């Protein structure tokens, strides 16, 4: 390795004035990132792209996806009930989970029933959702009352509702 100590040397590494790192970084950003010096232009372009991305991401769920959500909340309520009966979850957790499940079942039902579903008896679907929501809310109250026998009956009925909801979900999925 040759070390240059003279300022008149012909060695390229012996430069009396080092290159500006600012220009090196700026040119690297331009080449690698496609960034130019006009930061405001970039911000404006990004702001214009964001609404388009949000519109694409905010597509409403299909009826089949809503039924999947309904089945998920029904299963959550059932598993929470089974855990409470087996004394493996605290009362407060079980009650709060059932209350939330009841709320979500109501919300999903409202959204799903806003528009008519082709080939599906919406009255039957609405009755099922209402019955299931009422059962789940009753189960939450029965936990507070520590009424395991009535809770077990409500849980058994919820299992029947869950099976019926699964059949309806399959029917909706096949008709899309």
Image (spheres, rainbow, N blue to C red):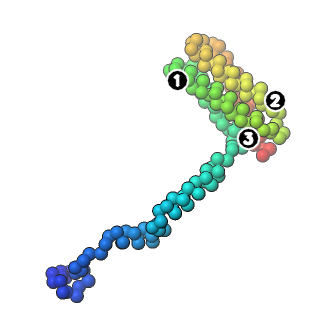
Q: What residue is at 60 percent from the left and 24 percent from the top? A: 99
Distance, label 1 to label 3, CA atoms, is: 30 Å
Q: Nearer the viewer, residue 71 or 50?
A: 50
Front residue of 51/10: it is 51
Task: Work out how far the residue at label 1 is from the one at label 2, CA to CA, in angstroms.
Answer: 33 Å
When asked about the image quadrant of residue 72, the answer is: top right
* Residue 27 x/y as whole percent: 41, 72
Which residue in the structure is indicated by mark 3?
A: 63
> Is residue 48 in view?
yes
Q: Which residue is mark 1?
A: 93
- Indicate left or right for 123 with 46 as reference: right
Q: Is residue 165 above or below residue 12?
A: above
Can residue 167 be seen here? no
Q: Residues within 10 Å of mark 3 (few under 14, many from 20)?
A: many
Q: Nearer the viewer, residue 63 or 5?
A: 5
Q: Is residue 123 above or below residue 49?
A: above
Nearest to N terminus: mark 1 or mark 3: 3
**Disc 1 element:** helix
Q: Which mark is residue 123?
A: 2
- Residue 175 placement, left or right of 134: right
- Secondary structure under the numbered disc 2 in the rendered image: helix
Q: Position of residue 33 (x, y in %)?
A: 46, 66
Left or right of residue 23, residue 37 in this image: right
């Amino acid at each position: 390795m040759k070390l240059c100590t003279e300022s008149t040397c012909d060695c390229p590494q012996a430069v009396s004035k080092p290159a500006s790192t600012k220009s090196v970084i700026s040119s690297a950003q331009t080449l690698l990132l496609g960034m130019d010096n006009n930061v405001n232009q970039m911000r404006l372009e990004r702001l214009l792209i964001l609404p388009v991305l949000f519109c694409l991401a905010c597509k409403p769920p299909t009826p089949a996806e809503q039924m999947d959500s309904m089945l998920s909340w029904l299963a959550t309520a059932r598993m929470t009930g089974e855990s409470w009966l087996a004394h493996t979850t605290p009362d407060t957790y079980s009650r709060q989970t059932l209350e939330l499940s009841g709320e979500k079942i109501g919300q999903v039902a409202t959204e799903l029933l806003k528009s008519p579903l082709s080939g599906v008896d919406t009255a039957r679907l609405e009755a099922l959702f209402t019955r299931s929501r009422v059962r789940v809310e009753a189960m939450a109250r029965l936990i507070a009352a520590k009424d395991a026998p009535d809770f077990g009956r409500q849980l058994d009925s919820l299992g029947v509702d869950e099976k019926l909801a699964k059949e309806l979900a399959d029917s909706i999925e096949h008709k899309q």
